[in-house]
């Protein structure tokens, strides 16, 4: 796709990433091998396309380096607007600032983002060739979203809590701070391997230092490059992240122009509703200063649409927010999943419901229960997830009531009867892959005491331990029972509003009770007690009215034959009296008398409820700092579940908490509190009774794994741990061999005294360093390496020297093998550009006499 009027490059219609850098105010494609590397002096445009259930989703980002010029930033913003037009308004547009990228942007670079010094203007370019003339220190941060920033080659750049990567071209030394987590070390190693494989063609070696005392040889290399370390390492500075309370503070503003002035008028706060967005206007949604969204109505003017980013930046300035605040611009009908979830309810036109049914807005229809083949659950885990079913409910069930804060077995004859004044534990056992699996439901009555609710949770922990900590724990709030919970009681689930099932009842049971029955078969039926008055009736359902003489089955005009049959089954549970079936409109006087007289009730046909489609979202939870912070993992997969994590999966109807085997005790114990806090602070005003499901690593049920693409049940047993990945880099027992290699590196005291280099140093030695260096080069200088006063080779194996070793030196003072007429050839690209102000290519294109003059001026003649 091209646009001749705007000089847009060809845009391929393909899935995945396409990246351009702004060079001389034009979009220049970045080689794929360089994806994930960004120069701090440049601006970039990133286009990402992915398939979705509704077609495809397109995201368009412009990235601003911290040292980029205003002109480049303006050009990037202009191109994004033009690209949006060329792509017919489908992309969600994002403004990204270095170091503050959105979670969506970071999700494209799973191995991490690398920030490099310089940019196009200073002669640095993205190249695909294998480069070894490198000496840099990368500060690696993050567990889920990794970024690596080039920092000063000095011990002063280090701290105790982060990973640092000393990149010497053919050797990469990963130094792990003493306070690093396993996940941070693993992500650092993944980044090091990515650099090795993509930038060095797999021909670099990696060494890791987890403990400096255990890696003396690697520490020696680091000290040779960085010098001796003086003083203690400083503590890591935690990232400034917005907590969930801040993100919950959403405000919607109407943006328009009046008499050439921009007017921003606040029109609503949390909870927001979709009908606030009018198609003729543009709006700004402020998520507590964490992120700014701009929504552009279909019928808004072209001028308003073009001004979206400008207005958002102006809004940020007016509010005094940081200039790095994320901005997301979207068009009416092409909203992002994150934007939709800021609203209490978001429905799409012609929303697909359940397993493929489509209902258009306003259609009146009887609510149908979706029937599905339970034998497909194991073959299609996505079906299990969609239907919230662990299995086909054919397993074994045990029920206990909390009594005197202890577990009291419930008579199996009364299984399925739950009283609002009690708490219950329900253990469900089913077979999968030839071994038992467990689901432990904690049912909390609406009128149960705080002590009983607490005791229910504590007893659940003890019961879980009895079954090897393998049970999936599900918190069930009265009235919010999950689908699978209904299914295991085979149509006999009855919820009593109050009272207790204990033997010694303090209050007599009411003489008259009314139950609403919903469901069409044994898998989805539930009877719920409602106030015994006529206003509780509904023409769409079946109700059971029990008195001391009779039990009435009242059948509303809109109920189905299946619903009537299920109500008959329940009637035998709630009453032993004679059953009288009556149709709506033919009630005897005694019926109305029992209900306290006739009264208006819901008699209209029930509208088919549109089931809003919400995209599942995965978060890393943290509240150790006293602030509840969640980091979203966009485009998640099983690989994002780390052993030392507590992760929250939000499928809207349920909240899953995934507990890693190595997660710390504090976060494990606070997991349920974290989930409750998440619901409480959600901008959309979520139902606090949403079921919370605790899942342990290695014991994930189908209704959890079905939300992940291509779940591997053997990952936890077959997947490599950090230690296994580390040991695969080489035979740790051969560390002593590196001492021999240190001579080949030709690092000595004179170089250190002359160059005073500094940078982070920590590595876990591995003999791979041996093959890592260029032996031809190192052998040719083997004699000089024995002389402590001779200049030394920087450890990248490519004959590159520091400027101090080459400038203003006589022939006798130069390292052996250096051609005195071509001293400049032995400079690194960075030093060369710094000294001559141009690249080597540009220098050698000049006339000979001009080259000689410049070499004289720089002390390299």
Image (tube, rainbow, N blue to C red):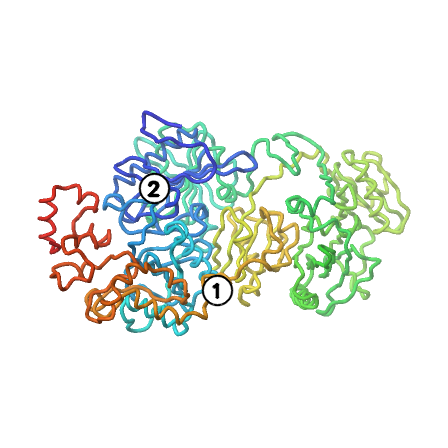
Asked whether the viewer can see residue 820, the reply is: yes
Residue 315 x %, y %: 35, 42
| First in residue order: circle 2 vs circle 1 | 2
Residue 451 x %, y %: 66, 67
71 w.r.t. 360: above or below: below
Disc 2 target residue: 44
Q: Going by the image, does 453 lie left or right of 573?
A: left
Q: Quadrant of the C terminus?
A: bottom left
For numbered disc 1, what is the local secondary structure? helix
Asked whether the viewer can see residue 294, the reply is: no
Q: Going by the image, does 68 lie left or right of 576?
A: left
For numbered disc 2, what is the local secondary structure? strand
202 w.r.t. 216: above or below: above
Image quarter of residue 86: top left
Pick whichever, 806 or 696, lies toward us: 806
Residue 699 x %, y %: 64, 58
Q: CA gap, disc 2 to disc 1?
A: 38 Å
Disc 1 target residue: 727
388 w.r.t. 447: above or below: above
Give the residue displayed 53% in from the left and 66% down from the top. 664
Q: Quadrant of the N terminus?
A: top left
């Amino acid at each position: 796709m091209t646009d001749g009027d705007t000089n847009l490059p060809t845009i391929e219609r393909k899935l995945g990433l396409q990246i351009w850098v702004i060079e001389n105010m034009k979009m220049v494609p970045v080689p794929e091998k360089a994806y994930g590397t960004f120069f701090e002096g440049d601006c970039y445009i990133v286009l990402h396309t992915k398939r979705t259930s509704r077609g495809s989703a397109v995201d368009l980002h412009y990235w601003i380096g911290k040292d980029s010029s205003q002109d480049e930033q303006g050009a990037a913003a202009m191109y994004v607007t033009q690209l949006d037009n060329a792509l017919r308004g489908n992309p969600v547009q994002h403004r990204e600032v270095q170091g503050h990228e959105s979670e969506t942007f970071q999700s494209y670079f799973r191995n991490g983002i690398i920030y490099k010094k310089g940019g196009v203007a200073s002669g640095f370019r993205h190249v695909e060739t294998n480069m070894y003339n490198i000496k840099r220190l990368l500060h690696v941060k993050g567990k889920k979203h990794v970024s690596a920033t080039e920092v000063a080659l000095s011990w002063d750049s280090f701290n105790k809590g982060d990973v640092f990567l000393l990149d010497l071209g053919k050797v990469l030394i990963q130094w792990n701070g003493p306070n690093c987590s396993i996940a941070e070390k693993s992500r650092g190693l993944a980044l090091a391997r990515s650099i090795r494989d993509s930038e060095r063609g797999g021909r670099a070696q990696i060494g890791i230092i987890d403990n400096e005392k255990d890696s003396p040889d690697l520490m020696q290399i680091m000290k040779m490059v960085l010098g001796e370390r003086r003083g203690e390492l400083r503590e890591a500075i935690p990232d400034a992240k917005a907590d969930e309370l801040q993100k919950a503070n959403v405000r919607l503003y109407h943006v328009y122009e009046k008499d050439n002035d921009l007017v921003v008028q606040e029109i609503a706060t949390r909870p927001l509703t979709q009908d606030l967005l009018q198609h003729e206007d543009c709006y700004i949604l402020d998520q507590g200063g964490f992120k700014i969204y701009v929504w552009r109505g279909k019928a808004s003017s072209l001028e308003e649409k073009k001004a979206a980013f400008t207005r958002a930046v102006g809004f940020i300035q007016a509010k005094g927010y940081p200039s790095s605040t994320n901005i997301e611009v979207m068009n009416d009908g092409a909203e992002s999943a994150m934007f939709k979830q800021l609203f209490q309810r978001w429905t799409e036109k012609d929303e697909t419901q359940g397993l493929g049914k489509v209902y258009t807005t306003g259609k009146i229809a009887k609510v149908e229960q979706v029937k599905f083949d339970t034998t497909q659950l194991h073959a299609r885990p996505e079906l299990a997830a969609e239907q919230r079913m662990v299995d086909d409910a054919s397993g074994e069930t045990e029920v206990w009531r909390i009594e005197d804060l202890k577990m009291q077995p419930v008579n199996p004859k009364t299984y399925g009867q739950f009283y609002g004044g009690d708490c219950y534990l329900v253990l469900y056992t089913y077979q999968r892959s030839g071994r038992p699996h467990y689901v432990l439901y904690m049912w909390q009555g609406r009128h149960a005491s705080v002590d009983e609710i607490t005791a229910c949770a504590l007893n659940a922990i003890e019961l879980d331990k009895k079954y090897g900590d393998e049970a999936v724990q599900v918190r069930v709030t009265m009235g919010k029972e999950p689908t699978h919970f209904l299914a295991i009681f085979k149509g006999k689930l009855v919820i009593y509003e109050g009272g207790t099932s204990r033997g010694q009842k303090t209050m007599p049971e009411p003489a008259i009770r009314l139950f609403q029955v919903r469901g069409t078969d044994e898998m989805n039926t539930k009877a719920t007690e409602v106030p015994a008055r006529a206003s509780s009736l509904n023409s769409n359902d079946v109700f059971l009215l029990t008195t001391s003489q009779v039990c009435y089955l009242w059948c509303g005009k809109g109920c189905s034959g299946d619903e009537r049959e299920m109500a008959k089954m329940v009637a035998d549970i709630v009453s032993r009296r004679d059953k009288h079936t009556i149709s709506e409109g033919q009630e005897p006087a005694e019926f109305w008398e029992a209900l306290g007289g006739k009264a208006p009730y819901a008699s209209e046909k029930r509208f088919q409820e549109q089931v809003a489609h919400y995209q599942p979202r995965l978060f890393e939870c943290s509240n150790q700092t006293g602030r509840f912070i969640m980091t979203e993992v966009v485009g998640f997969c099983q690989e994002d579940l780390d052993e030392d994590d507590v992760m929250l999966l939000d499928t809207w109807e349920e909240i899953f908490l995934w507990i890693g085997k190595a997660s710390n005790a504090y976060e494990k114990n606070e997991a349920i509190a974290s989930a409750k806090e998440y619901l409480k602070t959600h901008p959309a005003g979520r139902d606090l009774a949403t079921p919370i499901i605790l899942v342990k690593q290695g014991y994930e049920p189908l209704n959890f794994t079905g939300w992940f693409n291509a779940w591997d049940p053997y990952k936890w047993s077959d997947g490599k741990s950090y230690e296994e990945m580390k040991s695969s880099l080489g035979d740790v027992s051969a560390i002593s061999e590196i001492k021999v290699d240190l001579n080949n590196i030709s690092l000595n005291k004179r170089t250190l005294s002359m160059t005073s280099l500094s940078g982070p140093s920590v590595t876990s030695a591995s003999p791979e360093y041996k093959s890592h260096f260029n032996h031809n080069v190192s052998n040719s200088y083997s004699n000089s390496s024995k002389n402590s006063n001779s200049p030394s080779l920087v450890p990248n194996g490519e004959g590159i020297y520091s400027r101090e070793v080459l400038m203003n030196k006589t022939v006798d003072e130069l390292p052996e093998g250096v051609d005195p007429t071509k001293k400049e050839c032995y400079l690194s690209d960075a030093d060369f550009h710094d000294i001559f102000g141009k690249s080597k290519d540009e220098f050698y294109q000049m006339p000979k006499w001009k080259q000689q003059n410049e070499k004289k001026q720089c002390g390299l003649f």
